[in-house]
Image (cartoon, helix red, strand yellow):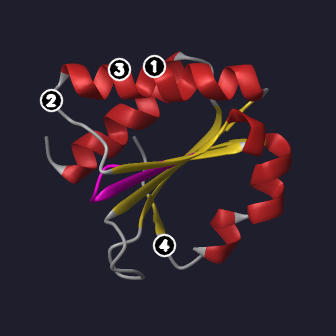
Amino acid sequence: MEPREIAVFAADTLDAKKGLDIKLLQVTEVTVLADYFVIATATSGTHLRALTDELGLKLKERGITPHHIEGHKASGWVLLDYGAVIIHVFTHEAREFYALERLWSDAVAVER
């Protein structure tokens, strides 16, 4: 799968598990870290784990494994690094605190 396809698939998977306020940002022109960021909100620590576990499983079924995973449900933020696609899943409080959309405001919002 190409990076855009992975990002859209990730956003769709998070949506299917009731992730909230899902944003897909193309960051190619503003950073060398990745081509796409996917940002979503979980309703609780348990929901955060369910979202990230489901996403990891669905991508692994397609032969896509993360390079790195950071955070856990207790921190309110999990980052899944798939190279060209970085997925951030937050609790509501953590998302407001880190405000990635504001930090990466020069990124291009992508419609699924």
What is the x, y in percent for residue 72?
64, 39
Q: Which residue is mark 4?
A: 107
Q: Which amino acid type corresponds to the residue marked 4 in the rendered image?
A: Ala
What is the x, y in percent for residue 95?
75, 52
Q: Nearer the viewer, mark 1 or mark 4?
A: 1
Q: Which residue is mark 3?
A: 57
Q: Identify whether 55 is placed above or below 93.
A: above
Q: Are marks 3 and 2 in contact (CB under 8 Å)?
A: no
Label whose residue precedes the other's in the sequence (1 or 2): 1
Q: Are marks 1 and 3 in contact (CB under 8 Å)?
A: yes
Query: Is residue 43 visible to the viewer in this orientation of the structure?
Result: no
Q: Is residue 95 found inside the magenta-colored segment of the image?
A: no
Q: Are marks 4 and 2 in contact (CB under 8 Å)?
A: no
Alpha-carbon distance for marks 4 and 3? 28 Å
Q: Which residue is mark 1?
A: 54
Q: Is residue 42 left or right of residue 39?
A: right
